[in-house]
Amino acid sequence: MNEPHQLPTRDFIGYGADSKKIAWPDQARIAVNFCINFEEGGERCILNGDDRSEERLSDVAVESRMGRRDLNIESSYEYGSRVGYWRLLKAFTDRDLPATVNLIGLAGERHPQALQAMIDAGFDLQPHGWRWIDFDGMSEAEERICISKSIEQVKALTGEAPLGYYAGLPSANTRRIVAELGTFLYDSDVYNDDLPYWSPDFPGLLLVPYSLDTNDSRFGRGERSYQVGEEFVTYIKDSFDILYDEGKTHPKMMTIGLHARLLGRPGRIGALYKILDYMVGHEKVWICRRNDIARHWAEHYPNRNAS
């Protein structure tokens, strides 16, 4: 085992040139997972005990205000909570499709009605940190408490412990804590493959890659932002088409990240309609929850190196 500061181990090889030949349910060529990031209310704000206001991922281009509130960005986030959640939910339920909720614990407490509606729709919950903050620099003890609170929250809401965890902005300790708690089957804080793989450091922990490119956060990245919904549609379709074609012989996985305060706007939600309808129009596409992918992988491709 490496020294703690050397974890997680970097791996530049992965499955290699031939990739890994797998089979999804019903011989699907691609598994597609949509993650709704339930963050609004858990962002930085002095009302939450922070020393500054939020500055990331909204339609308001600002810098943090130290020790003061920024009412514009607060209100921009509230749009996602008040309106955007419901638009995203309807896009999936109208098509009888599942999704995953990347749940910020505090945000779930702030808007339990929308969260419960997503649970009732059959969406699974993946803890996304108790707060939507950078965990780098947080003490290990404090981070462990935050993750444990998320576990208890999901248990209370669903009757079961969560299978996966996604910090988004993890510390060097996050994956080790996740593995040591013994609750989680998988961790999503990786972006380095188109298929799940088993952690080289913690053999019982599956790593299910997330994505920041097939992600509507690109509407809120300053000068690199998308300007209209069709740009998002084009990029998602292009990504899907390549993975779907590769899936003829080597099935792949695709994750699409969504944010209610971004894609939930009236000028953008149509992009999600187009994306969902495009995918549904193809044969052998498995649109599924994140837990479904992890369970399938653990059952059919267990880690032979695990003790």
Image (tube, rainbow, N blue to C red):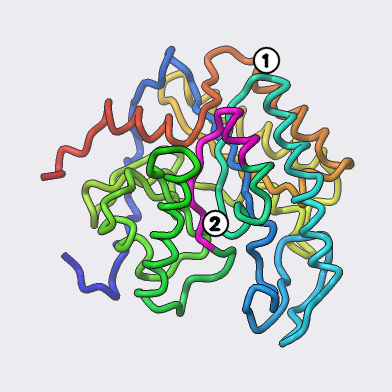
Question: From the viewer's perspective, is residue 178 above or below residue 250?
Answer: below
Image quadrant in which you'd find residue 206: top left
The part of the chain drawn in magenta is 116-130
Judge the density around disc 2: few (<14), some (14-19), many (≥20) Cα neighbours within 10 Å. many
* Membership of 305 in magenta stretch: no
Question: From the viewer's perspective, is residue 131 above or below residue 35?
Answer: below
SS under mark 2: helix
Q: Is residue 190 visible?
A: no
Taking depth in this image into account, of 204 and 201 the one nearest to the observer is 204
Q: Is residue 12 left or right of residue 229?
A: left
Q: Tell me the kind of residue under disc 2.
A: Gly
* Membership of 118 in magenta stretch: yes
State the residue at coordinates (47%, 36%).
290
Decide which of tag 2 and tag 1 comes sooner along the chain: 2
State the residue at coordinates (84%, 72%).
71
Mark sitting on residue 281? 1
**For the residues marked 2 and 1, what is the alpha-carbon distance in whole angstroms?**
35 Å
Q: Tell me the kind of residue under disc 1.
A: Gly
Image quadrant in which you'd find residue 251: top left
Taking depth in this image into account, of 177 and 7 the one nearest to the observer is 177
